[in-house]
Amino acid sequence: MNQLMTELGQVYYQYRPAGPQQPTLKCLPAFGWDATDYNFKHLMARLPSQVGLLAIDTIGVGRSIHSQMVRTVPHILANLEDVVHHEHVSNLLLVGHSLGASYAFLYAQQHLDNVCGLVLLEPPYAAMAPQLLANVQSFIENYPQLVQQRQTLTLQQLLAEVNPLNLLAERVANARIDLAAYANPSILTEAQCLPQLVTTLRTAEKRVLTLPIQVLVTDQRLTAYQQSPWCQLGHLVHAPGQHYLHWTNENFVRQQLLIALSQS
């Protein structure tokens, strides 16, 4: 595990350098609190060894809870870029899930010269704002009680919320990271900043990037995505599974990543 002290605080991350002429996959998870490397670990382990891997816990989630940060879009993107700059990583293929896909898309707009493509798993879009804001409102209003309740969960209950494909020891370690990070108030600030993210997305969706963008969605949400900006911004690919596609249909996601790697 690597760590970097930035102007915003201490950031922990996992990094495997790429082989010659190979891209580096940078993984961005959904709104949550577990460790990014564990969130994508089983999937990443099944990719070619010469491909670089970068999994960053931005401040307030995963292992990066020794510092506090207001989790605005600029701050989260700054955490990501600080690590990329420090490690001199180039030729990034961004893999983002859910809210992490939003950050991946916005990061790519700022760093087009260093991004070779995006693979986005069920990314949000601005028209989803009422649903997104409703989903986090209860979390915001009840956060202190939710923290207390989470401390009473059994290990089995915590294991049910982390990547089920990992080894048991990895799942236990991730569940403990998840539990500790949930109590970090930085998490609350990200939920509170969601309206600003929606506003930023509304502007970003008007800009078509000259990058290959794979948008992976579940069968049941295909129709909604066909009517969304992602139909024009990227290439929609659908398959059976649930919102956590990289957990519920890993083979499909891996095949799409291999296609993206071949195009990079």
Image (cartoon, rainbow, N blue to C red):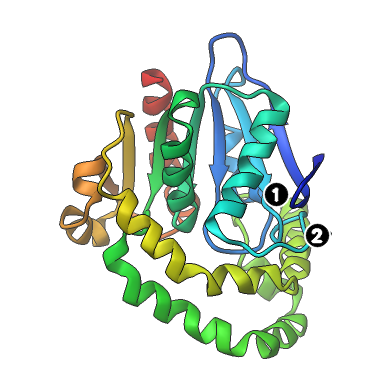
Q: How far apart are marks 2 and 1 (CA)?
A: 29 Å
Classed neighbour count for the residue bearing mark 1: other residues with Cα under 10 Å, few (<14), some (14–19), many (≥20): few
Quadrant containing the C terminus is top left
The x and y percentages for residue 25 are: 54, 31
Residue at the location (32% across, 29% down)?
Answer: 212
Classed neighbour count for the residue bearing mark 2: other residues with Cα under 10 Å, few (<14), some (14–19), many (≥20): some
Residue in front for this viewpoint, 171 or 205: 205
Q: Earlier in the sequence, mark 2 or mark 1?
A: 2
Say left or right for 135 vs 165: left
Q: Name the residue under label 1.
A: 167
Q: Mark 2 points at which residue?
A: 67
Say left or right for 167 vs 239: right
The x and y percentages for residue 201 are: 36, 56
Q: Is label 1 in a helix, a strand or a loop?
A: loop
The x and y percentages for residue 105 are: 41, 44
Residue at the location (31% across, 68% down)?
Answer: 128
